[in-house]
Image (cartoon, grey):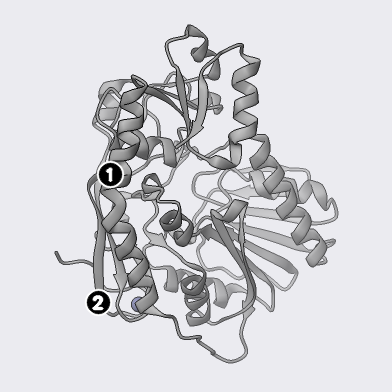
Amino acid sequence: MTVRVCPLCGKDAEVTVRRDMLPVFQNVTYATAEEARRAPLGQFALATCTGCGFSYNGLFREELVEYDENYDNHVSSSAFADYYASLAAMLAERYPLGGRVVYDVGCGKGEFLKILCDLVPQTRGVGIDPSCRPSVAGNMRLIQSRFDGSSFGENAGLVLCRHVLEHVAEPLGFLQALADAMPDTPLFVEVPDLDWILEHKSFWDFCYEHCNYFTVPTLRLALEKAGFEVEAQSRSFGGQYQWAICRPAAHFLVTDADAGAALESVRRYSGAESDQVATLRDRAEQVGGVAVWGMATKGVMLSLMLPEGLVRGGIDMNCAKQGRYAALSAVQIHSPEWLKQGEISTVLLMNPNYLDEITQQVRGLGVSATVVTA
Ligand SMILES: [Zn+2]
């Protein structure tokens, strides 16, 4: 199979994890089951660079993915809200943002920027995203656009780029454009962490929208190659995410990455993946089918990988998704109240970070279904 060369260093890659067909968007839902089955498709081959260890979808075609207002990645959860609040508090404590501008490149609908702008009323927030609705409210402005490389201006206090880099076919060029547009300003970058996916064998975390899969060393490598100096790196959100804080560097310095170790861990994961899928299938069969709670990336991907009919329905707190159908699997998405029908004995929870919260919510409905993590 011919795959793209490494977007970070141009060397050849080894393919491990394969998916014949994935929906191009897992965060777009459909009005009917028929439309959901006709969702646009793309191919996936996890390629890991033999030179630098960076992992990416070697068959990704950027022209298939066009983000617009139909893109909805909103997550309704108190655990998620707590995470946003703690992240905003960390940034507000670390950087003097009063009287300065915070730019959020790829802000989605601007939810995180709003929390930061509310926390620091003297700051001004500017969010840029092709899927947002343009608006001005209080100390925050949203611009419906892709990042076009224009300069952030001398008054920039902080630039955010959360959950963007994993969607960009040429992350290096994108980061270089950011570096060129920045004065001496900190950049906060957050992405999912590949090592968490591999360690937890969460096969539902590979999707078409995510064309890049960073580890802590390869995120650092990408930032350094683009001309940033990394000041801090950390895993976050229970280890599922990782972030880095960096600044445009005075001198290029690139830390070597260990391609051998990276290849070793994707090979080990890939060798065990089909057993992992079979184990979950057996569990679902034993209880006569399950409801999947969390129909964002994880739930939509899992519904695809289990035999048809085993996922009897999806549940999501995002009202805009309720009543609609998940891409390709055509599993219908419901509100939690749907469980009251009593046909579901087992709720499969896609994100372990929400276990306490969801278990309480199911009990609150008077439903006796068991909530287990996938
Ligand atoms: Zn490479």
Q: Are marks 1 and 2 in contact (CB under 8 Å)?
A: no
Q: Is mark 1 within 8 Å of ligand 1?
A: no
Q: Which label sits on residue 106?
A: none
Horizontally, residue 296 falls left or right of residue 42, namely right
Q: Is mark 2 within 8 Å of ligand 1?
A: no
Seen at 42% across and 46% down, the residue is 67
Seen at 46% across and 73% down, the residue is 218
Pick the front one: 92 or 363: 363
Query: Quick one: label 1, few (<14), some, or many (20+) residues within 10 Å?
Result: many
Seen at 41% across and 80% down, the residue is 258
Residue 321 spot, x, y in % from top left: 47, 26
Horizontally, residue 204 falls left or right of residue 35, namely right
Seen at 79% across and 67% down, the residue is 95
Disc 2 target residue: 12
Query: Quick one: label 2, few (<14), some, or many (20+) residues within 10 Å?
Result: some
Pick the front one: 32 or 93: 93
Residue most extreme to the left? 1
User: Residue 82 lies in what quarter of the image?
Assistant: top right
Q: Can residue 203 be seen in this view?
A: yes
Q: Can residue 27 be seen in this view?
A: no
Which numbered disc, 1 or 2, marks the residue that appears first in the sequence?
Answer: 2
Residue 117 spot, x, y in % from top left: 76, 50
Instruction: Give the quadrant of the C terminus.
Output: top left
Q: Which label sits on residue 22?
A: 1
The residue under label 2 is which amino acid type?
Asp
**Which image quadrant shows ligand 1?**
bottom left
Question: Considering the numbered disc 2 on the image, is that residue within a helix, a strand or a loop?
Answer: loop
